[in-house]
Amino acid sequence: QVQLVESGGGLVQAGGSLRLSCAASGSFFAINAMGWYRQAPGKQRELVAGITRGGSTNYADSVKGRFTISRDNAKNTVYLEMNSLKPEDTAVYYCNAGVRTTRVSLRDNNYWGQGTQVTVSS
C-alpha cells in the first residue's frame, strides 16, 4: 500500500507564494513520475506540473514561469513552489504518483493524495 500525504496549502494574498509538499510512504519498489493536479470549483481537474524520476518537468501554460516542481527521491517527496499567485490559482491541489509496487510489477499504479486547499485572495 502507498500513501501520499500533502502539506503546505492555505490562504495567501495575490502575488504571494506558497510551497506544497507531498511525501509518499508505505511499501513499494520505486516511484516513477510524480505530479500536481488541481481542480477549481466548476472546472475539470487539470495537470499543473509533472516531473519524471530523472527530473524532466512539464507545466500547464497557465503556470509556466510562476510555479516550479521538484522532487527529492531520497525522501520520496515532490514539491510545488508557487510564486506570483493569482486568484485564479485557487483550487484543491492533488498530488499524484506513478508507483512500481514490486520489483516484478509489470506496470505502475497511480496513487492520489487527499487534496489540499489553496486559496488566493485578491
Image: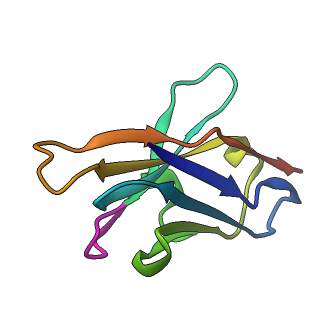
56 inside magenta stretch: yes
Image coloring type: rainbow
* Magenta span of residues: 51-58
Above or below for 70 versus 34: below
Pick the front one: 60 or 52: 52
- The N terminus - image quarter: top left
Q: Is residue 74 left or right of residue 121?
A: left
Q: Is residue 79 left or right of residue 52?
A: right
Q: Which secondary structure dominates the residues rendered in magenta?
A: loop
The percent coordinates of residue 72 (x first, y second) are: 46, 78
The percent coordinates of residue 46 (x first, y second) are: 47, 37
Residue occupying image coordinates x 89% and y 60% = 13
Above or below for 80 versus 89: below
50 inside magenta stretch: no
The percent coordinates of residue 87 (x first, y second) are: 77, 47
Residue occupying image coordinates x 15% and y 42% = 107
The percent coordinates of residue 97 (x first, y second) are: 40, 50
- Asked where in the image residue 19 lies, by quadrant, the reply is bottom right
Pick the front one: 63 or 2: 2
Residue occupying image coordinates x 10% and y 43% = 106
Residue occupying image coordinates x 63% and y 52% = 5
Pick the front one: 52 or 4: 4
